Amino acid sequence: MQWITIFKKEILEDWRNYKWIWVPLVFIVICIMDPISTYYLPQILESVGGMPEGTVLEPPEVVPSQAIMMSLTELSMLGVLVIVAISMSVIAGERKSGVAELILVKPVSYFTYISAKWAEKLLLVFTSYLIGMLASWYYVDLLFGQITAGQFFSLFFFYLIWLIFVISLTIFYNTIVKVPGLVLTLTVVTIMAMSAINQIFSYRMPWFPNSISGHITKMLMENSVPNALWGAVSITIILSVGLLIASNFILKTKEMAD
Amino acid sequence: MGEILNSLPIVAPLILVQFLLMIIALISLIKAEQTNGPKAMWAVIVIFIGFIGPILFFIIGRRQY
């Protein structure tokens, strides 16, 4: 199967450039950094000094669900940036260097090419994200209190949909421009613009993709899945599929034009 | 001092992971045939800018093609 061949080639490539090692490690640090530093905030402030005499340092009141949301907040900034950075040259780089032409003159369909690459990046991100969040779960449980398995896995899977969207968006820009740095810029600008739109119109568009993490916070507090979350997740999945189909179409017309 | 010892089992894994990241970045740096910019500069960045340094090297420093 061609699909499997391209998929395996991608895994091998990411193994050789160490992505399968460093991305999971980076995700662990991203996920556990904030819960740990919040827990030790009083000690850190004390050792830094500069506090007036007699200041009583109360440990911050953080409930477990808030603590695990800190991991998601960090992931939506640093984590997303890392995801975009590791996938910015997945197709753009190969088109620039001419490897894409070498592959696509063979009877390999554009969709096989795009979807195999998309799936490999997804597997890498999924693995890293799973390891990172399991580490975060362990620490939150240890330092702040209990998060049930049900809470954890629903949080995990709903946020995963957002990460899938980020990968699809990066792949989409990969087919539009050939310069990896430009792919990164365009993707990050798009996500930032979407986040601004989400903040302005959050009441009118509760199903906007960027609102997923907000709905997850609500879900953890109320212990039930809000309807808006289902809506946002469905829209995000549809958008991701749409982006992949559009990438297929764009790559096809672009390659023919060359 | 007691507090530091108590927090060691909690903080140690975080430090260990960051250390591992640095070592892998250094191995990759040594094995790389070419990097974007001098290798010595990347060695300094990887070692002294904890956590962000190795990420920068993996993303920008390694020449992919």
Image (cartoon, rainbow, N blue to C red):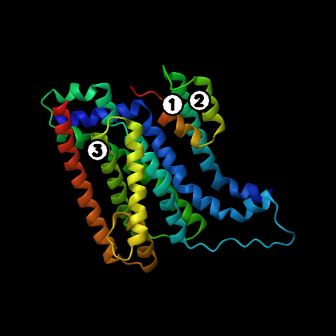
Residue A165 lies, with reference to residue A68, above or below; the image says above
Q: Chain of mark 3?
A: A
Residue corresponding to mark 2: B42
Quadrant assignment, res A86: top left
A206 left or right of B14?
left
Disc 1 residue crowd, few under 14, some 14–19, many 20+, Cα 10 Å: many
Quadrant assignment, res A15: top left
Q: Chain of mark 2?
A: B
Task: Looking at the picture, tell me which residue is in the foreground, A136 or A27.
Answer: A27
Task: Looking at the picture, tell me which residue is in the foreground, B16 or A118.
Answer: A118
Q: Which mark is residue B61?
A: 1
B6 left or right of B16?
right
Q: Which mark is residue A69?
A: none
Secondary-structure class at tag 3: helix
Quadrant assignment, res A7: top left
Q: Position of residue A120 (x, y in %)?
A: 31, 42
Secondary-structure class at tag 2: helix
Q: Does residue A149 show up?
A: no
The answer to whether the residue labelled 1 contacts the one labelled 2, judged by CB atoms less than 8 Å apart, is yes
Residue B28 lies, with reference to residue A155, above or below; the image says above
Q: Chain of mark 1?
A: B
Counting the numbered discs, the total is 3
Q: Which mark is residue A118?
A: 3
| Residue type at the position of mark 2 | Trp
Task: Looking at the picture, tell me which residue is in the foreground, A136 or B31.
Answer: B31
